[in-house]
Image: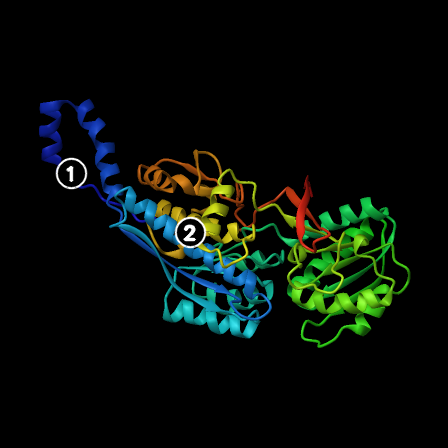
Amino acid sequence: MASFPVRLNRRRIIEAAGSIGLGALASRLPDRLAAAQDNLSLTLKYGVLVGLTGDAAPAGQAWNKAVSLGIDTLNEKLAAAGLGDRLKAVLTDSQDSEGTAQRGVEAATKLVTVDQVQVVIGDLFSSVTSAAAQSVVIPNNVLMFTGGTNPALTQLNGSGPTLLWQPVAADDLQGQVLAKLMGEAFSADADVNAGVRNDAYGTGLGEVFRGAWEKGGGKIGEYVTINPDQPTYDTEAQQLVSGDPAGWLMVDFCPEFAKLVGPLQRSGKWDPTKTFGSDTMIDCGTEVKEAGVPGMRAVQANASAGSSFKDYQQLFQSKASNLNFQAFTAEAFDSVFIAFLAAVAAKSNDPVEISKQVVSVTNPPGDDYTYLDIDKAVQALLAGKDIHFNGATGPILFNAQGRVTSTAYDIWQVGADGRGKVVDTISFKA
């Protein structure tokens, strides 16, 4: 942490002591220290890494917009408080990962080595995050907030500073939640079939579910790995409906799942009301045509528990009416403020120094602040006070390993109109 020297000539101290008294002088020293802190000048450079084209484009474009809204809001609040001339955030660039690891590494390289950002927000794909973090972000000591949910991601921090942060509940929790809900729906010892996307996200979540399901006494008849670049899925559909399962688990993205729905329906053996999906399948109504999938359920970590969530949603919808609002984008929005508050607490834009303060600004003790009063949170830090930032997603509460623990999950269900909506919210303890 950078220090701010306050040099007081010894003779002047003695003279001041004689004229105003030692007690009075001592009372002025904290004011001088606070004034020195108030002179902090800091610019934090952000970059977005996310799929702006391809399968994840709708989610990626919304994620990107959430970051830009966060930065604009932060700068507006700082300017209104008279701090904008010395403290500001900059969105340097948004790079398209195209949802692939190779392109993600190239995009991250541009952000880190050319744009020299201190904070990368993204990617939504765990595979892209993993490749970019290992190859570019962590070796160059840059901070990263990922939307990826693979529980192995934060292990990439190793024994060094925690540079990779995961503001979303990881799949080791989601897999257990799915096993719990399916056990309640079909009985804990039922036979089910599972279809999982063949990438780090799909196989990671699938294996967590398999372990939790079998530990609870259940059996998996068919465990089908689905390659996302296939033109058709007739063979996979036949495998998934074989064996008369009590129900199904699907871990996929909506565009690929939409290709699977037709073959499943034509089999005459698949029932969407007995199917559970992952958090990427909460609302596939725009992609799934034909007869749709009414009754299908999916789970997602609750990203709307914060007191400021409705304000964030209104802000997003007023500024991005061309994009479909999705609650998980609050994770990207929150990450903007977390990184900046940690930088102010560190009195530095050095990512390693910032990383040391992320836990302190997202956990008690300290007064609670949301993005709506972010200027007051900054002023409190400048005055040397503790703060607890509460995001639009909720309390956050990062641990030192870079993870949050979410105990609330939304259950989504597809209605007769083909669109998903939240029908219940449950509390879950691992």
Q: Where is residue 153? Give x, y as percent.
A: 58, 59
Foreground tag (2 vs 1):
2
Disc 1 residue type (three-letter): Leu
Disc 2 residue type (three-letter): Gly
- 239 lies above or below 15: below
Numbered badge on residue 417: none
Q: Where is residue 112? Give x, y as percent.
A: 41, 67
Numbered badge on residue 8: 1
The residue wearing badge 2 is 70
Say which residue appears at 43% left-offset and 61% top-offset: 142
Q: Is residue 123 visible?
A: no
- 412 lies above or below 118: above
In the rendered structure, the answer to whether residue 349 lies left or right of residue 198 reads: left
Say which residue appears at 81% left-offset and 74% top-offset: 235
Q: Where is residue 114? Give x, y as percent.
A: 37, 71
Regarding mark 1 in the picture, which secondary structure is present there? loop
Say which residue appears at 31% left-offset and 37% top-offset: 383
For the residues labelled 2 and 1, say whether their Cβ atoms are less than 8 Å apart: no
Crowdedness near tag 1: few (<14), some (14–19) or many (≥20) residues, C-alpha within 10 Å? few
